[in-house]
Image (cartoon, rainbow, N blue to C red):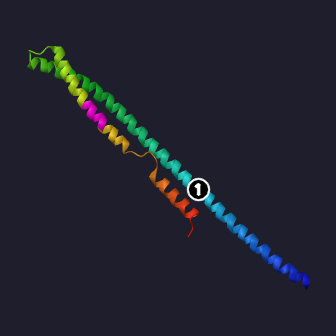
Amino acid sequence: MIDQLRNGPDAETTASQSSITGLVSGIVKDVQELTSQQMALFKQELRDDMRNVRDVAIAWALGLAGFAVAGIMLAFTIAHLLNWGVPVLPLWVCYLIVTCLMALIGGALAYAGQKKLQSFNPLPDQSVRAFRENMQCLTNPK
């Protein structure tokens, strides 16, 4: 009987400790799985964003090359048209005028592009936000 009383509380303590251990290990496993899923989502969004950036960059580069050729041809045309319309101006002055105008237009477009680039965020916002929320919940349970 004394042995049963001694074994009884120890058995209950051992059982409660093992259930607490199982609970804690389950929580740790869930946290690891959640973190793993968050990282997988982050990587997928990053891949998608990089693929979109690559596609845009290729289209932009090809368009820019065509636009550059057209711009050069237009500059020659305008310079010769200016020389034809104002025969007093030497041809080199006409080229200088057209070059300055093109430089101003190009500078304005480059400035607008720089402003647009500064507004671009390369990080996947949804994954980062969800990861922060999960970490906040884990570190500050209520």
Dot 1: within a 10 Å radius of its alpha carbon, few (fewer than 14), some, or many (20 or more) residues?
some
Where 122 sits versus 66, above or below? below
Magenta residues, start to end = 105-111
Q: Quadrant of residue 11?
A: bottom right
Q: Which residue sits at x=52%, y=50%?
A: 42
Q: Which residue is mark 1?
A: 35
Estimate the x, y position of residue 124 in percent, counting from the top left: 46, 50
Q: In the picture, residue 15 is in which quadrant? A: bottom right
Residue 117 horizontal side relative to residue 93, left or right: right
Magenta run includes residue 22:
no
- Can you say whether 22 is above or below 32 in the image? below
109 inside magenta stretch: yes
Specify the farthest residue to the bottom.
Answer: 1
> Can you say which quadrant of the picture contains the C terminus?
bottom right
For residue 99, side relative to residue 51 (left or right): left
Instruction: Name the quarter where the N terminus is drawn.
Output: bottom right
| Relative image position of residue 81 (x, y in whole percent) | 13, 20
Q: Compared with residue 133, is residue 90 higher up or lower down, i.e. above or below?
A: above
Q: For the residue labelled by badge 1, is the local secondary structure a helix, a strand or a loop? A: helix
Measured from the top left, where is residue 74 in percent x and y?
Answer: 21, 24
Q: Nearer the viewer, residue 107 or 31?
A: 107
Residue nearer the viewer, 44 or 25: 25
Give the residue type that dot 1 points to.
Answer: Thr
- Residue at 61 percent across and 60 percent down: it is 31
From the viewer's perspective, tell me whether residue 76 is left or right of residue 13: left
Q: How far from the left and from the top, in percent, is residue 101?
A: 20, 27
Residue at the (55%, 64%) spot, across then down: 137
Prevailing secondary structure of the magenta residues? helix
